[in-house]
Image (cartoon, rainbow, N blue to C red):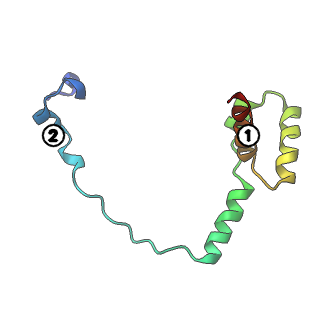
Amino acid sequence: MKRGARKNSDDMSASELAESTREFEALLPTLRCKPATKANLVRFERARKAGIEQPGIRRAVFDDEALLTEALAPARRRNMVLGELIERGLHRELAVLD
């Protein structure tokens, strides 16, 4: 098929769909990974708890910088990242609605 004349998968017959998706049927190569050690898991968990700065999410949720610092205080006291605190708050609010 020409590049500009692609059909939507809903408009294709079974044989056309099979032909167009044939390249994805091959198995993915297995990765040679070894299981994580206890020390690596502890290090990963510490890094996850420290959190990665995501300013885009912060700007989308918090317009006011003072509100952000006020929200971060209980998260730090509970040794949580901001996302976990927001998730707990959403769970609590949704439980009230039920």
Q: Amino acid at mark 2?
A: Ala
Residue 83: image location, x then y, percent: 71, 44
Task: In the rendered structure, find residue 73 and report the number of the disc placed on it.
Answer: none
Residue 8 makes an appearance in the image = no
Neighbour tally class for label 1: few under 14, some 14-19, many 20 plus, Cα within 10 Å: some
Write down the quadrant of residue 7 in the picture.
Answer: top left
Q: Residue at x 50, y 74 (%)?
A: 35
State left or right for residue 67 relative to residue 96.
right
Question: Dividing the image into 4 quarters, which one contains the N terminus?
Answer: top left
Neighbour tally class for label 2: few under 14, some 14-19, many 20 plus, Cα within 10 Å: few
Reading the image, the residue beneath label 1 is 86
Q: Residue at x 87, y 53 (%)?
A: 77
Residue contact between numbered discs 2 and 1, judged by CB atoms under 8 Å? no
Local secondary structure at mark 2? helix
Local secondary structure at mark 1? helix
Q: Amino acid at mark 1?
A: Ile
Residue 66: image location, x then y, percent: 89, 33
Relative to 78, say whether 41 is above or below.
below
Q: How far apart are labels 2 and 1 at the CA level?
A: 44 Å
Relative to 37, say whether 28 is above or below.
above
Q: Residue at x 67, y 69 (%)?
A: 43
Q: Please identify, in this view, whether the residue under mark 2 or under mark 1 is nearer the observer.
A: 1
Residue 37: image location, x then y, percent: 58, 77
Of label 2 and label 1, which has the lower sequence position? 2
Question: Dividing the image into 4 quarters, which one contains the C terminus?
Answer: top right
Q: Residue at x 74, y 37 (%)?
A: 92
Reading the image, the residue beneath label 2 is 18
Q: Nearer the viewer, residue 93 or 16?
A: 93
Write down the quadrant of residue 11 in the picture.
Answer: top left
Relative to 44, say whether 91 is above or below.
above
